[in-house]
Image: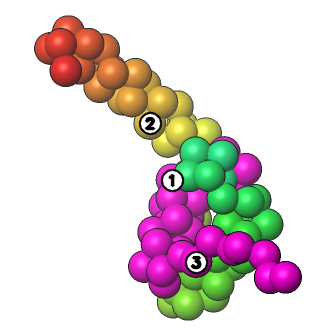
Amino acid sequence: MGANRESYTPQYRREAAHLVIDTGRSIAVVAREIGVGEQLLGRWVAIERSRMDDPPAAIDADERAELIRLRREVAELRMDRGS
């Protein structure tokens, strides 16, 4: 008996990998958000990084703090707007 395994398109794999690469979020967090295993996502990230000529460096603490602040501000504005 074969296991029913999820099949993901190459585009989905690249986009999922870039959720980690471009934002600097951990593989564990992104894997939980999109509902895939950490090891699987980790492989996709490694493959995508190897394909990139010059992968971006993870964001530093100041950039992460600014990103958090901006996300919070956007959430507040959306609540104010009623969206």
Query: What's the amino acid at mark 1?
Result: Thr
Q: Which residue is mark 3?
A: 7
Residue 55, quarter of picture = bottom right
Q: Earlier in the sequence, mark 2 or mark 3?
A: 3
Residue 83, quarter of picture = top left
Q: Which residue is mark 2?
A: 67
Q: Position of residue 48 (x, y in %)?
A: 58, 81
Marks 2 & 1, CB-CB < 8 Å contact: yes
Q: Residues within 10 Å of mark 2 (few under 14, many from 20)?
A: some
Q: Residues within 10 Å of mark 1 (few under 14, many from 20)?
A: some
Q: Residues within 10 Å of mark 3 (few under 14, many from 20)?
A: few
Please identify the residue farthest to the left as the structure is shown. Answer: 81
Q: Earlier in the sequence, mark 2 or mark 1?
A: 1
Whether residue 23 sits left or right of residue 38 in the image: it is: left
- Determine the residue positioned at 64% across, 84% down: 47
Q: Which residue is mark 1?
A: 23
Say whether residue 3 is magenta.
yes
Q: Position of residue 43 (x, y in %)?
A: 72, 76
